[in-house]
Image (cartoon, rainbow, N blue to C red):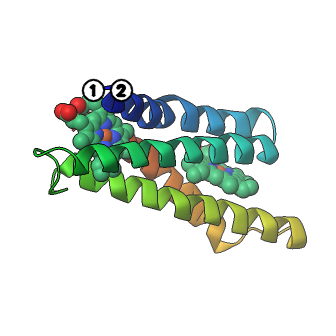
């Protein structure tokens, strides 16, 4: 039971509160602060994922990993790693050349899809 609470708090809290806060922080402060908040939150998600996988593997009900919640959650957390790379690639290129790259549009587009998708995962 403890593991469910930790998992739900880490992943639910990240998608519902911390990632959206990181986006507000980007607009109110700096890219650097956005980067820090999103990377710390990504780390919390990875810890939440470890709890999820251990908890699922130990449960007769969830060990087959075929529940939509589990599959959507795996996709969401893997896509987050890609999202962080895109944010970094775009920011580095923009700092060097002053021009946005395709990674900018991918980071903006994926981010706006991924956050509602993660919230939805917590509800299925
Ligand atoms: C975006 C990612 C995720 C979010 C926001 C999330 C959120 C939640 C929340 C809020 C709960 C508690 C409510 C409930 O029982 O439905 C929960 C339970 C659970 N989650 Fe996740 N989760 C995510 C990803 C995952 C992944 C990747 C797995 C497994 C690989 C997983 C496995 C489970 C399991 C086994 C439970 C316990 C369900 C029960 O005992 O009824 N979750 N999750
Ligand atoms: C998984 C972690 C991350 C998530 C979920 C995320 C999410 C987002 C979202 C949703 C936006 C769009 C904001 C809007 O709608 O106005 C955005 C913009 C941005 N992000 Fe991230 N981000 C992450 C990591 C990073 C990292 C590591 C960097 C590297 C510095 C970064 C740099 C940026 C920049 C520069 C923008 C503004 C792009 C522009 O408007 O030109 N992000 N991010």
Question: Is residue 54 in view?
Answer: yes
Can you tell me which quadrant of the image ligand 1 is in?
top left
- Residue 92 relative to residue 18: left or right: right
Q: Residues within 10 Å of mark 1 (few under 14, many from 20)?
A: few
Which residue lies at the image location 81% right of the left edge and 41% below the top edge?
30
Point out the image quarter for the C terminus.
top left
Residue at which label 1 appears: 1
Residue 21 in percent (x, y) is at 61, 31
Residue 115 in percent (x, y) is at 46, 44
Which residue lies at the image location 41% right of the left edge and 48% below the top edge?
49
The secondary element bearing badge 1 is classed as loop
- Residue 106 relative to residue 63: left or right: right
Q: Is residue 20 above or below residue 117?
A: above
Residue closest to the eye, 35 or 112 = 35
Question: Is residue 120 in view?
Answer: no
Residue at which label 2 appears: 5
Q: Residue furthest front?
A: 58
- Residue 116 relative to residue 38: left or right: left
Which residue lies at the image location 80% right of the left edge and 46% below the top edge?
32
Residue 96 in percent (x, y) is at 89, 71
The secondary element bearing badge 2 is classed as helix
Which residue lies at the image location 59% right of the left edge and 64% below the top edge?
105
Point out the image quarter for the N terminus.
top left
Contact between marks 1 and 2 (CB within 8 A): the answer is yes
- Residue 37 relative to residue 46: left or right: right
Residue 48 in percent (x, y) is at 44, 41
Q: Nearer the viewer, mark 1 or mark 2?
A: 1
Q: Residues within 10 Å of mark 2 (few under 14, many from 20)?
A: few
């Amino acid at each position: 039971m403890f593991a469910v609470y930790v998992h739900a708090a880490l992943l639910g809290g990240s998608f519902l509160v911390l990632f959206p806060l990181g986006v507000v922080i980007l607009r109110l402060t700096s890219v650097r602060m956005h980067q820090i908040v999103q990377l710390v939150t990504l780390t919390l998600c990875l810890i939440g994922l470890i709890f999820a996988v251990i908890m699922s593997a130990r449960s007769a009900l969830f060990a087959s990993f075929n529940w939509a919640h589990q599959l959507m959650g795996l996709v969401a957390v893997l896509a987050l790693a890609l999202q962080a790379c895109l944010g970094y690639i775009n920011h580095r290129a923009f700092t060097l050349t002053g021009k946005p790259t395709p990674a900018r549009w991918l980071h903006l587009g994926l981010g706006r899809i991924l956050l509602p998708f993660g919230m939805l995962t917590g509800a299925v």
